[in-house]
Image: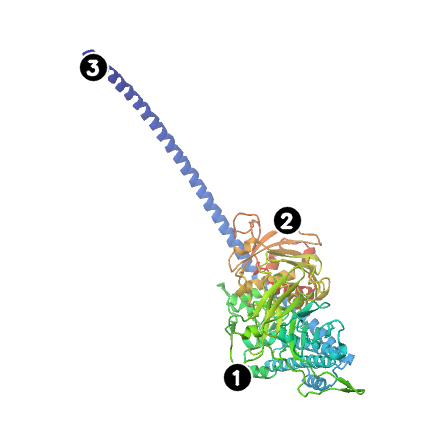
Amino acid sequence: MVTRTLYSFTILNMSSKKGRKLTKAQKAKKLQDEEERRLQEEEDARVQAEKEEQERLERERKEKELERLESKDLERREDELNELRHLLEENHTAVTTWKADAFETAKWEKYMRCDGIPDPAVQKDINTYISLWRDDPHVDITLVLKQCSVALQLVEELEGLLRDVTDPQEGHKYQETLISLQELIHSKHQLTTEEILKKASANIDTETGNMQTVVKDDNITLCLWANLKKNPRFKGLTFEETGLGFELPKQLAVSNIAVRILHTHYDHLSILARMTHLRTHTASYRSLAGDEDVPADVDEPEQEETKEEEEVKEGSEAKQEGEDEEVQSIQGLEGRKSEASLKTRSDSAQSVGGRGSQIQTQIEALGEGDLISSSVQQTKLNQGVVDLMQYTPLGGVFYYDVFHLPPQAHQVNGWEIRQLLDKGLQVFPYPVQSSTSDENDALTCPPVGVTVTLPESVVFLETPQVAHWDVAEKQWRMDGITDVSYEEAEAKISFKMDSFQAFVLMQETYVNFPFQRWELRPLEQNSALLTVNGALIDISITIQGDQCMLQSELEKGLCHLKGKWMSGPTLQRAMLNAGVNIFGNEYTEKFVSTSSKDPLIEHAAYEQMALFASACAFSWSKWNAKCGAEHLVIQVCEHHGPDPVPRDSWRLYLLGAQRFQKLEITERSEAFSPDHSPGSEFHSTFIHMLQDDMSADGKRESNNLFVDTVQSLLCATRPLMYS
C-alpha cells in the first residue's frame, strides 16, 4: 500500500515539472505572436496612413480639377448660351418664314382653283355654303356622298383652324361652324337612307323576300335591311361584303321595320363628349410643329363657358357631333414648377415674350424657375362612363338604328301610289316603353345583337372594348354591353345591347407605354431614324427634311400609312387614329408609370439633340432612371451612314440644369456614379459638350426644317420621360 502511494506521487511530480516546461514555451510563443502582431499593426497603420494621404491628395487633386473645370465652364458660359440662343433663333425664324410662305401659297392655289369650295376661315362664305347645301333637295345617294366628302374636307380644315386659333371668339365661331357641318352631314345621311327605304319593295331579294343593300365610299359604309316578309323565324343577317351583321328578337322580326348599320370612318361624337364633360386650362407650350408657343386653351369667364355649352347642346339634338382629333405634344410642361433650385442666369439671358426676335433657351428658363401652372377640371365620372383620356375610340362610329319602314309604293292601273309623310324617317321604339316598371320587361324585350369585323385601317393591340353612346348625357358608356365574344383570328367581335344605339370600338390610349428603349440615329445629312420599342410593338419613323414616314413590322392595320411621306403633325394624327400611340400628353402620367423628370431640362435636351441629329446617334440608358428627377442620362456617339451603331461606340452623358458632362461609367457598369470622365470638361450646353469629341464633318449644320421636325417628334414622344 505504501509502495503504490509513493509511485503515484512520483508520477504526479514528474507531470507537474513537465507542465511547467510547456507553459514557458507557450509564453515565449505568445510573446513572439504579440510582437509580430504589433509589428503588423504598425505596418497596417503606416499603409493606411499612406492610403489616406493618397486619398486626401487625390481628393484635393479632384477638387482642384473640379474647381478648374467649373471656373473654365463659368468663363465661357455666356458665350455658349449666346451661341445656342442664336442657333435656336435662326432655326425658328427660318421655319416660321417657310411655313408662312407655304400657307400663303396654298391659300392662293386654293383661290385659283375656283372649285366652289369655300374657305372655312371666311365666315360669310362658309355660312352661304351651308345654307345652300341645306336647301338642296337632291337626295340621290351618289351625289350626296360626294357632297358629304367635300363637307368632311371642310371639317378637317376647321379642326386645323381650331388647333391653331388663339382668339377665343374666333375659336367659338369655328366650333359653331364645325358642329353645323357635322349636323348637316348626318341630316343628309338620314335623307338618303329614307329615300332608299321608300323604294325597298322595288328591290326585294328573291331568296329572302326582304330588301338588303350596301353602299360604300371612302368615308362611310351604309348597310340597310327592310323587313318586307316579316318572317317570325328570321334571326338576323350578315352583310358579307362588309363583315357587319345583326340579330333581332322575334317581336322585331314580325314588325314593319328597317335596320341600318351606318359605319362612318370618322368620329363626330367624341368631341361632343369632351366639350360637355371637360374644361381644360393649360399653359402655353410649343406646338407640334415646334416653332411657336400656342395656348392650348384659353380661360374664359364662367358665363361665357356656360353660354357656349348651352349653344352646343341646342345645336346637337341629333345623335352625331363633331370630333376634333387634336394632337398635342408637351402641353404646359406638365403644369409643374421646376423642382431644381438653380442659380439665376447671367444678365444676358433674354426673357420669352411671344418668341419674337429673341428666343430664350430652355436652359436659361431653368434658372428663372417660374412656370405657368396648369390645372385640369374634370367632372366626376360615373361608373361605366368612358374616360376619353384613358381610352381612345378607333375605327369610326357605328350607328345601329331601327326605323319604321316608310310606306311603300303601290301600282294601281299604271299609277304609282305612295303615302307621303311629313315627319320623315321615324325611329322605331325599342325596347317598348311601358308605363310600369316590370321585371318581365327584359324578357319581353330581349337585347339586340350585332357583329362587327374590325376595320382594316386600325391596329388593336389588345381585345377591343365596346362603348355605346348615351344621347342624354352626351358621353360614351361601357355598361349595358353583354355577351361579348371576340374572335381574334377572324378579327370579329360580337355583343348585345338593350337597345339600338351608336357604338364604337375602343382601346387603352397608353397600351404601348412605357417604352422599353429608344434610339435616334442619323442616316445621312438631314435624315434620321427614330425607333421606339414600345411595351407591345416597335415603331420606327424615318425623318427626311420636314417629311416623316412610318415603318413597322405589323402587317395589318398600317398598310395605308407605311411607306408614305407626310408631315410630322399629319403622321402623328394618322398614327393615333390607327391605334398606334407613342405620343404623350398632359394626361399620360396619370395612366403610365414614368421616370419623373424636370420638363424644362427634358425639353432643353430635345432642342439640342435635334440640332445634331444629322451627326450624332442618341439612345436609351438604364441609368436615366437612376440619376434623379433633375438629371438625364443619354447614350451618345458620333455616327454617319445608315449602318447600326457599334455597341462599343456609345458614351454616357449626364445632362443637368446648368451643367453637361461626359460620365466615367458605361452602360455595363455595376452602379451609377455621377463622376465625369477623366480628361473631359464641363459645358453649359449639350451641343458644346458634344462638340468636344466631334469631327469636322459632324459639325455641319442641319437643315432648319429637319431640325424642327426632329425636335417636334422628340417633344411629342418624350422618350427620356416614358422609357
Q: Nearer the viewer, mark 3 or mark 2?
A: 3
Earlier sequence position, callout 1 versus callout 3: 3
Earlier sequence position, callout 1 versus callout 2: 1
* Amino acid beneath label 2: Arg
Relative to 412, does residue 294 appear above or below in the rendering? Answer: above
* Amino acid beneath label 1: Gln
Q: How many marks?
A: 3
Mark 3 secondary-structure assignment: helix
Q: Nearer the viewer, mark 1 or mark 3?
A: 3
Outermost residue, right side:
414
Residue 348 rendering spot, x and y as whole percentages: 56, 68
The picture quadrant where one finds residue 304 is bottom right
Residue 407 rendering spot, x and y as whole percentages: 70, 83
Mark 1 secondary-structure assignment: helix
On screen, residue 24 versus residue 379, left or right, reads: left
In the rendering, which numbered label is found on residue 5? 3
Question: Considering depth in this image, is 176 or 59 the residue closer to the camera?
Answer: 176
Residue 21 rendering spot, x and y as whole percentages: 30, 20
Q: Tell me if mark 3 has few (under 14), some (14-19) or many (20+) residues whose alpha carbon lies within 10 angstroms of its own.
A: few
Mark 2 secondary-structure assignment: helix
The answer, for residue 281, to whether it is visible in the render is no
- Name the residue carrying label 1: 303
On screen, residue 267 versus residue 676, left or right, reads: right
* Amino acid beneath label 3: Thr
Q: Quadrant of the N terminus?
A: top left
Relative to 300, does residue 58 appear above or below in the rendering? Answer: above
Q: Tell me if mark 2 has few (under 14), some (14-19) or many (20+) residues whose alpha carbon lies within 10 angstroms of its own.
A: few
Q: Residues at badges 3 and 2 in contact (C-beta under 8 Å)?
A: no
- Name the residue carrying label 2: 647
Q: Residues at badges 1 and 2 in contact (C-beta under 8 Å)?
A: no
The picture quadrant where one finds residue 9 is top left
